[in-house]
Structure formats: C-alpha cells, structure tokens
Image (spheres, rainbow, N blue to C red):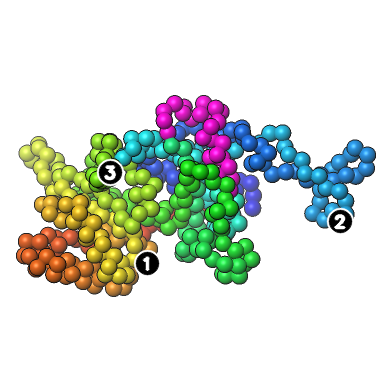
Amino acid sequence: MAGGEVSAIAEMANLVANDLVKWFKWTKFPLVDQNFKCLKVEKHSTPRRKRKVGGDATQEASQDDGNVLVEDTIPKSHNHPVDVILSYVDPYTAKRVMLNTDLKSYQTNSISKTMIRNALKSLGNTIECARSSPDWKAKYNFTEDADIRGLLFVYNHDGDYDKNFYDIFRSTPGEGGDKGQGKIDITNLPISKGQLLHIIEPKIINYMLSIINDSANLHAEGTFPETEYFFYYPELTLHKTKLPKEVRPATIELLSAPYLIIEHGPIKKYNERTSALEDRYGDGFVVYYNRSGSTVKEFIYLLDTLSSFQMLDRDCSLRLRIAHDSPADALRSNFEAAKATYAEDWGFDHYKIEKLNRIELKLIEVAQKKFSATDVGWRV
C-alpha cells in the first residue's frame, strides 16, 4: 500500500471523530499528532537485540541467531504518541475528563486481537506517563484538576465489520479467525491502579452517527431543536449534577450504556405572517436505545427506569428510538407486552395507561460512514 494511501486511511478516523465531538458536547484540543518523552524508558520501551560478532563490534540480531550470544539493550530515550486530546466536564463531579486518544482506522480483516492488544498496551503505557509528565501537561495546558484517561477509537473505514468487537476479549485459541492468539487478557495489560482505558469501537461509532443523523431528520421535520438539546442525567441519592443542563456532555459511560436520553424544550417556528415565533412542537424527551429488544424484561426495566425519572408522569412527548444494528423481529411485541405488564401492576389505571400509550416507538436507520482513500487523499 502506498504511503499516501496509508496517510489517507489514518486520516479517516480523525474525520469521523471530528463529526462526533461537537454534537456530543466534547472538546477537541487543537494540538494533534504529538509525541512526549517517556518517563519509564526501561519499563515501556522495547529492548533492541544485538549480537556479538567479534571483539567489541555488534550488529542488530537476526531472527535466527543460532548459538550466537544475544544481548538486550535498553534505548536511552523513548516517546509516547498522542493523536489527539478529547475532553469534557463530568456532570456529576464537575471534573474535566481528558481522553488521550489513539485514533485507529482499520479494514474489517485488520481488526484482530494482535492489533487491538498492541494498541491497548501502547495506550496503557502512554497514560501511565501522561498522568505525571511535565512535557504532556505543558503541551495540553494541563492546569486544572483533571482525570486523565486513555481512549482507543477504532473506526472501520470499509463499513463491513459486523462482529461483536468484544469477542476478542472472550474467545479461545482456534476460534474463528486470528487462530492461536487466544483472548486478550486484560489482566496482562499495563493498566495501573486507578487508571482507565475506554474503547469506542465500530458499533458505538455507528450508534453515535445514527443519533446525529436521526436528530437532524427530526429537526428537518420541526420536532427537534438545532442546538437547544440537553443530555439527561438524573439526580441520584448520593450524586447530584453540578453543571447547568445546557452544557452537560454525553460522557463516555453514557455513550456505552443501553440508552441515552435527550431532553428538549418547545420547538418554535418563525411565522412570516405574524412576524412572531410560534410553538411548532412541545417539549419532551427522546430516548435512543442501543439494545436489540429481544426480551420483554429489558423493556420492563426501561419503563421502570423512565418511571423512576418521573418521565412517564410528565405532560410532554416521549419518543423511544431504537438505534441498534440488529433489532429483534419481536421488538414491538415485546414492548407492547412490557406495557401490558406495567398496566397490570398499576391495576389498569386509565390515566397511567394513557401515559404509557403516548410513548412513540420507532426503529431508525443505523448509519455507517464510509470513505474512499482517494477522496480523503484530496483533503490531507
């Protein structure tokens, strides 16, 4: 593969990340594609192998050294890569989460245990140094009390990846492709105590793109705001939100959860005849659901959650949008069965049944963003 094409493929993940960051209210630090000095060279670097060839002379070892004496030498210096820093402020702690991000763009057949294991190992070492590196802190204006974490962003640029990404952490030697590598044992990854590594894998990327596309369609219909939307965080018993709802981001935990709730106010439209803003659509909630809907119990749990948030009692719209790549055939039947179970528990209270029946259920198209390496090559 030519160098220009490799560069274009690497740029694809960056282009997708740019599309996602702003909508979910994250911040991208403008300094990209940097290195910083390793603080633990002996621990983090790969030893260079050399062999004796006579006297004091040495040369790089070959793969087959036979009985020749081989020496491992530790490099004097080592650097860690940083593709980009993404960040947001956690709604509950009001602490900035800084995600030292490794952007990967893979073809379907390149997403392997070996590639992911190596990426996570490198990221773990990078974060261990970043948390105490003056070089890292100086580059990224690290002045506040922040939570530095690692993020592996795995984009599938040909759009053909249809596997469960996390099978690479569960499979055994000889299963599927990647034979003989076994599973990725996370206990063997260089992750220090209190250190967090997150993964945004192909299906989560598609889920995020689907939310953006669907909200744009709703906006075109006049039933969703262009900018005045809020990611919903409940007030918990031990944890209260510390940020105004207007600035709360979708955290990495929220994006990985079974559902994501967005709140919005009344949608207004300009009336040219009266020169005034008029209500076009009422306030409400949009719930994006990232599970298959294959069981009645999961919908009972979801209804119970919405009830605990007092959403079922609110006099507003409540839209449930299924954004899963493989929705169950019985999804609607399971949802109706869950509503019937709830109605029975409520003693078939007419008022409460009306509240359940106002929930609008719709399956939305799951988005996939595909790039041509040639097209991207014109941009880089």
Q: Looking at the picture, which amino acid does disc 3 mark?
A: Leu
Q: Is residue 286 left or right of residue 123?
A: left
Q: Is residue 178 left or right of residue 158?
A: right
Whole-angstrom CA distance, mark 1 to mark 2, is: 53 Å
SS assignment at label 2: loop
Give the percent coordinates (x, y) of residue 187: 55, 53
Q: Which mark is residue 326?
A: 1
- Asked whether residue 145 is drawn in magenta, I would say yes
Residue 7 is drawn in which quadrant?
Answer: top right
- How crowded pointer 1 is (Cα within 10 Å; few <14, some 14-19, many 20+) is rated as some
Among the two numbered marks 3 and 2 on one chain, the one whose residue lies closer to the N terminus = 2
Q: Which mark is residue 238?
A: 3
SS assignment at label 1: loop
User: Which residues fall within the magenta stretch?
Assistant: 121-146
Q: Is residue 211 left or right of residue 128?
A: left
Residue positioned 53% across, 49% down in the render: 104
Residue positioned 90% across, 37% down in the render: 56
The residue closer to the viewer here, 170 or 229, is 170
Give the percent coordinates (x, y) of residue 218: 24, 52
Whole-angstrom CA distance, mark 1 to mark 3, is: 36 Å
**Residue of label 2:** 66
- Asked whether residue 320 is drawn in magenta, I would say no
- How crowded pointer 2 is (Cα within 10 Å; few <14, some 14-19, many 20+) is rated as few
Q: Main secondary structure of the magenta part?
A: helix
Give the percent coordinates (x, y) of residue 326: 37, 66
Q: Looking at the picture, which amino acid does disc 1 mark?
A: Ser
